[in-house]
């Protein structure tokens, strides 16, 4: 039986991207995005629930996130779920589940950053999946290289 690990989110950044280089020099960005569900309860009252998602972006796409994204910006993320484990300073086992981005599309307008690039490109050593357009075709959709073997956090 086949399996599928696919996540698609549209949300808003809760903070500016955190971008750094790994020990091997590869660029990695961490994004926090919020998705909000709104509904009416049985009595007709408005209800709202926000979920926060940790997104990891690699390579050239991480650099573009740093250049064009800031807190509050809407984005579309396509990727896969990954759970990592590590030991903290006291030796306790810790776990985190995050979305490893395979495609990110910037939505809405960039405040003060000008219009985002509109081309699609492949980055990294291994071929990335081709990206189809989503929503407004004037926004970029860049496939991401998948090198996640040296995440030290």
Image (cartoon, rainbow, N blue to C red):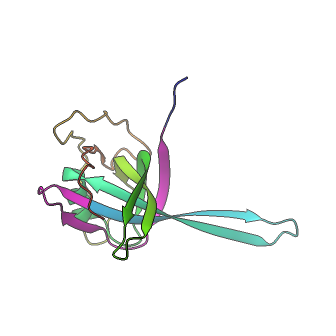
Q: Is residue 109 visible?
A: no
139 and 39: which one is in front?
39
| Residue found at the very far left of the displayed protein | 25
Q: Which quadrant of the view contains residue 54?
A: bottom left
| Residue found at the very far right of the displayed protein | 43
Q: How many numbered discs, if any? A: 0
Q: Which quadrant of the view contains residue 146?
A: top left
Q: Which residues are magenta?
A: 5-28
Q: Residue drawn at (24%, 59%), measured in percent from left and top? A: 28
In the image: residue 61, left or right of residue 108? left
Q: Residue drawn at (33%, 75%), measured in percent from left and top? A: 89
- Give percent across and percent down for residue 43: 88, 70
Q: Which quadrant of the view contains residue 91?
A: bottom left
96 and 87: which one is in front?
87
| Residue found at the very far front of the displayed protein | 91
Q: Is residue 100 above or below residue 65?
A: above
- Give percent across and percent down for residue 142: 28, 45
Q: Is residue 15 magenta?
A: yes
Q: Residue drawn at (34%, 57%), measured in percent from left and top? A: 56
Considering the image in quadrants, where does the C terminus appear? Answer: bottom left
Q: Is residue 5 above or below residue 14?
A: above
- Give percent across and percent down for residue 126: 20, 35
- Give percent across and percent down for residue 105: 36, 50
35 and 74: which one is in front?
35
| Residue found at the very far bottom of the displayed protein | 90
In the image: residue 150, left or right of residue 31? left
Considering the image in quadrants, where does the N terminus appear? Answer: top right
Q: Residue drawn at (30%, 68%), measured in percent from left and top? A: 17
Q: Is residue 29 visible?
A: yes
Q: Is residue 143 magenta?
A: no
138 and 70: which one is in front?
70
In the image: residue 83, left or right of residue 146? right
């Amino acid at each position: 039986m086949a399996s599928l690990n696919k996540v698609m989110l549209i949300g808003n950044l809760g903070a500016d991207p955190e971008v750094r280089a790994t020990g091997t020099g590869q660029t990695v960005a961490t994004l926090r995005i919020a998705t909000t569900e709104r509904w009416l309860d049985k009595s007709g009252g408005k209800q709202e629930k926000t979920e926060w998602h940790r997104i990891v972006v690699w390579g050239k796409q991480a650099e573009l996130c740093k250049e064009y994204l800031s807190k509050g910006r809407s984005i579309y993320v396509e990727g896969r779920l990954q759970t990592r484990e590590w030991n903290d300073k006291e030796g306790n086992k810790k776990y985190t589940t995050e979305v490893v981005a395979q495609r990110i599309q910037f939505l809405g307008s960039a405040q003060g950053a000008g219009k985002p690039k509109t081309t699609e490109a492949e980055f990294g050593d291994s071929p990335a999946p081709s990206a189809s357009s989503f929503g407004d075709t004037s926004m970029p959709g860049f496939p991401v290289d998948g090198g996640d073997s040296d995440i030290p956090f």
